[in-house]
Image (tube, rainbow, N blue to C red):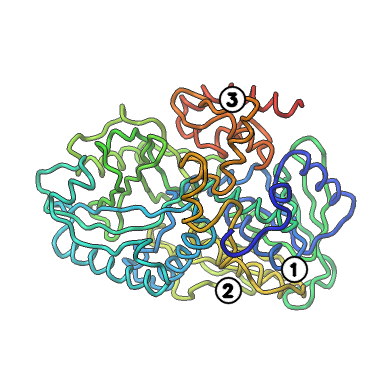
Amino acid sequence: MTGGTAAGGLGGTSLNGRRRERELAELAAGRSVDLLVVGGGVTGAGVALDAASRGLSVALAEARDLAFGTSRWSSKLVHGGLRYLAHGDLPVAWESAVERDVLLRHTAPHLVRALPIVTPLTGDLSRPGATLVRAGLGVGDVLRRAAGTPREMLPGPRRLTTVETLGFAPALRRTGLRGGLVYWDGQLVDDARLVVALARTAAGFGARVLTRLRVQQIEPGRGSGSGGGAAGFLVTASDELGGGPVTLRARAVVNATGVWAPTLAPGIRLRPSRGTHLVVRAGVLAGGRAALSVPIPGEFGRFALVLPQDDGRVYIGLTDVPVESITDVPEPDEEEITELLGVVSRVFAAPLDRADLLGAFAGLRPLLDGPPAGHSRDAGRGSRVSRGARTADLSRRHLVHTDAGGLVTVVGGKLTTYRRMAADAVDAAITASGLTAGPCRTTRLGLVGSAPRERLAGIAAPARLVERYGTEAPRVLALAADAPELLEPVGEATSVTGAEWLFAIRHEGALTAADLVDRRSRIGLVPAERRAALAAATRLFDHATSR
């Protein structure tokens, strides 16, 4: 790791069914923790790591699986906040640039890489509009330098000739193309893998990471209150694997459940929006490896993104549609699919249609709708958007709120800034409960598998595994030492191997076959491939857990 080490090596960071049973039994028997985190997405896992690395005893309760909700449906970008500059939200753009640097250089160099993004200059982007975009790229580069990210890691933006633009993106339509603009941003190999790495690193510092544990009620102890030294909380939960009701005890509780936060903290007001992505084959880019940022006609400051992945797929997104009801797995609607296909087809030489679709996925953003009553810290502070505004115009700032009983809720924000959100939430929990803890360490704390890029380049393992597992890639390969068949792909349309799934069962907290298909690998994003892979995952899971 680049900036710190979780205690206990691979064993200490391993999450599996046996560890879950042991640690859940300890808590059910009455053992109290300093901090209980509710929610196993990127923010909740980040809170658990921040608190555990400060020396607090920590438990994390997640109703489903790690990254089950919003955290697996992102654009998988670690970006510097250019969109927020277009809306004049400099504090969020600056925070994004700083947190991007932390991820790129310290937290997860193996999971984050530089991605060139091209904005084609076509009739949909007027010359004044192109000038504004170029100015925004310039400001973004100033923030990149101020954050300390070296140019060798993220090159500066520049104007491209038409020939250069087509070199980056050969799938573009030549007619009407007058060059392009290119900038570099960060791209995650896999957002769900980031969450798993955070949770495992927290476990290495002693955190109890308990999935399939649904929190139902949080009751503050007598005399608790913000700043008054909380007497603690009694938390009622349900073991979703058949263990029945469980009572947990904690000095402090952080609600990090995203769009579900109002369930536990009714005073929180959100205006969730749905962001949809399409999944298509890599062939639509005609061999290009650059991403595209395509202006959405009639929408100032909004762009559709065409994002190449390393698994033979391309993601196209992102919509911003307000939603009234919250579902565990949101579904894109036909209008969103049509909109995205139409926007990118305007710039492609070969327009896309429904036949190009392999799948689609959608996530929900927990956007803030005004401050709740009580003690709140609005990161970035500033004016609120009115109730009638579009969700696309709502700020991506985050809020840390402590209610009268001492419960801390963290909402808003985005994946890139999860670490800052987590640090703010832990600070608030310490203040509310009177806990004693060390300072935040996560700005230089590497996750499991992380190492300087020079060391990663020398690891004796396929590049694909190093990008996902970092220094642990040889351990994945070692699982096939006595079973070479585990190095074979688990399906015809994927590079995922049985060894990766076995590693997920033994060390990454996978408790079901669906965990393997949908979150430890991303095969599940394509329905046809998911159906084919689920049977293989079930067989391997049953074999691995019966020994």
Q: In this figure, which residue is indicated by the disc labeled 3?
A: 484
**Among numbered discs 1 and 2, the one appearing first in the sequence:** 2
User: Does dot 3 land on a helix, a strand or a loop?
Assistant: helix
Against 369, residue 337 (above or below) is above
Q: Is residue 235 left or right of residue 85?
A: right
Classed neighbour count for the residue bearing mark 2: other residues with Cα under 10 Å, few (<14), some (14–19), many (≥20): some
**Among numbered discs 3 and 2, the one appearing first in the sequence:** 2
Residue 68 is drawn in which quadrant? top right
Estimate the x, y position of residue 524 in percent, counting from the top left. Answer: 51, 32
Foreground mark, 3 or 2? 3
Q: Which numbered dot is residue 405?
A: 1
Viewer-side residue, 142 vs 479 = 479
Foreground mark, 1 or 2? 2
Q: In this figure, which residue is indicated by the disc labeled 2?
A: 377
Q: From mark 1 to mark 2, how far is it between C-alphas?
A: 16 Å
Residue 233 is drawn in which quadrant? bottom right
Estimate the x, y position of residue 386 in percent, counting from the top left. Answer: 42, 67
Q: From mark 3 to mark 2, how far is it between C-alphas?
A: 53 Å
Q: Is residue 444 left or right of residue 93?
A: right
